[in-house]
Structures are given as C-alpha cells and as structure tokens.
Amino acid sequence: MTAYSGAIDSAQTVADIAVATQIQIDDGLSVLSLATSTFNAEKENGTKAEVVHAIDLGTSANYAALAKSGISTTGATSITGNVAISPAAGTYLTGFSETLDATNTFSTSSYVTGHLFAYDYASPTPVVLGTATADMQIAYNTGAGILPDYTELFAGDLSGKTMSSGAYQWSNNLLINTDLTLTGNSTDIWVFQIAGTLTQAAGVRVTLAGGALPENIYWIVGDSISMGVGAHTEGTMLGMTNIAMQTNSSINGRLLAQTAITLDSTTVVKPN
C-alpha cells in the first residue's frame, strides 16, 4: 500500500506538469502500472489477514469438562467424555454419586460415559491433571492472542446472525438472544474472543451448517459463561472464570473453566 500510494503521487506529479515530455509521461505510467500489478498480486497472495488455525488444547482436549475449583451437577446430566478437577480435591465433584475405582486413580458415575478425576486421587492422576490444567491455560492465552479478522462486530449481539469462519473479537460482553448459525466446511475455524461475559438466552441454539465441526470452534471468554435453560451450543468453551449450564442445556464440545462449572440436567458430548 505504501509503495502503491507513492507511485500514485509520482504519477500525479507528472500529470500536473503542463509541459511534461513523453518520456516523463511514459516513465510515470510504467511506475504506476508496475505498482498496480504488485499491489493486486499482494492482495491475492501476500497481505491477507492471518489464517486462523486450530488452537492446540494439549492434554486438556482429553476432557469433556475440566475445571480448577469444582464441577457440580443436579438432575439427569449426561456427559460423554472424561471429567476432571485440579487442583481441587474429589470432594469438589458434587452431585455425581461417583464410585472410586480400586486403583484410586479415577472414579465412575452413572452420569458420565468416561472417567472422573480429581487432584487428590492416586498417582499418576495429580501429575496428569496438573499438565491438563496448564495446557488449558496455555490454550486460553493462545486463543486470546490470535489476531482478529473482525472487532466489535454487531456491537456484541450475535442474535439471529450467520457467521462464516474467522477470528472475532469483542472488548465487552457478547449476547446470543436468538439462534446463531455458523456456516463453513469441515476445515474452517472459528475463534470468538470475548473480554466480558458470554450469555446465551433460554431455548436459543447455536447450529452448524455446510459441514462445520464443533471441534473447530473456540469461545475464549474473559468473564463468566452462561447458557440459558434449554439452550444448545457448539464448540470448546475456554472460560477465565465460571461456566454455568442451566437446566436442560447442551453442548457438542468441551467445558474448560479456570474456576468452576455448574451443570443442571446438562448434556455434554465431547467431539473428536
């Protein structure tokens, strides 16, 4: 752009000369033509916004729900995938009626298709969970640091919108009050960077179209996350604070919280 602007200025200087020679005119046109070709080529190949790649979740990807201070559930919750808390102890897994395995390294629950883990379980569980929570924090920081393609879009209200892939950033809260559609193919990536809260209203759905996959969607939230009664969402929730899933809410994705997760007859299905 700088080179192109300079070429335009140079050409304008020649155009302003009332008695410009043919050589000056030809030289000015040649410089402008080359700059135009270079600028157009760079637009196609060299100056696009940063390509958004999948966020490496590390070992935190092994969990459908992972929190530092506790995970609680009420009602007929159903989780497909592992559940873990660290550095909190097993007493902060509440409502699961879990049964500790004979190895003392994990427990099981009728609410979970998978295993439950806590930091005070037997070795090697504490080390494994320490790595997972560290990876969760790294993933959050990585997601928050991605250069956004769009900022402050729709003033933080995605109600009723259809969003293509890319990185989106908001400096305050984000609302989803009516259904949101994410449309793209199976390799497209969505990153939503939200400095404030994320609130999805009761009964509202985030749906996928065109082959989009939940494992390619990331919600990076600096404050609390609240999914309303009967709401459904897609993707990995990386919350700096708590994640609250209200009655009969559901997610195809992961819940990864820096503090606590609360569930109420919630369905969580971890993607591949």
Image: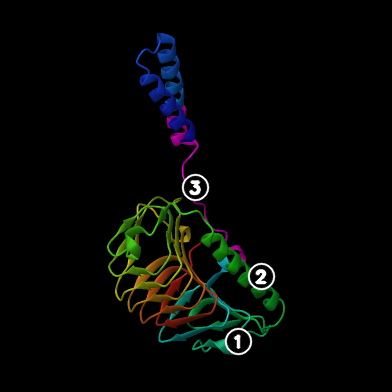
Q: Position of residue 108 (x, y in %)?
A: 56, 82
Q: Is residue 237 above or below residue 242?
A: above
Q: Which residue is mark 1?
A: 90
Task: Say whether marks 1 and 2 touch (CB < 8 Å).
Answer: no
Instruction: Please state which of the two labelled residues, at mark 3 or mark 2, is closer to the viewer.
Output: 3
* Comparing labels 3 and 1, the label whose residue is closer to the camera: 3
Query: Which of the two discs, 1 and 2, labels the residue nearer the N terminus?
Result: 1
256, 198: nearer the viewer: 198
- Measure the C-alpha gap from mark 1 to mark 2: 17 Å
Q: Is residue 257 magenta?
A: no
Q: Which numbered dot is residue 51?
A: 3
Residue 118 position, x and y percent, is 62, 82
Tell me what residue is drawn at x 39 percent, y 70 percent. Answer: 173
Eye-nearest disc, 1 or 2: 2
Percent coordinates x, y for residue 46 in the rendering: 50, 37
Write down the region rendered in magenta.
Answer: 38-59
In the image, taking residue 272 as reference, residue 20 lies left or right, namely left
Secondary structure under the numbered disc 1 in the rendered image: helix
Amino acid type, callout 1: Gly
- The image shows residue 113, relative to residue 30, as above or below, that is below
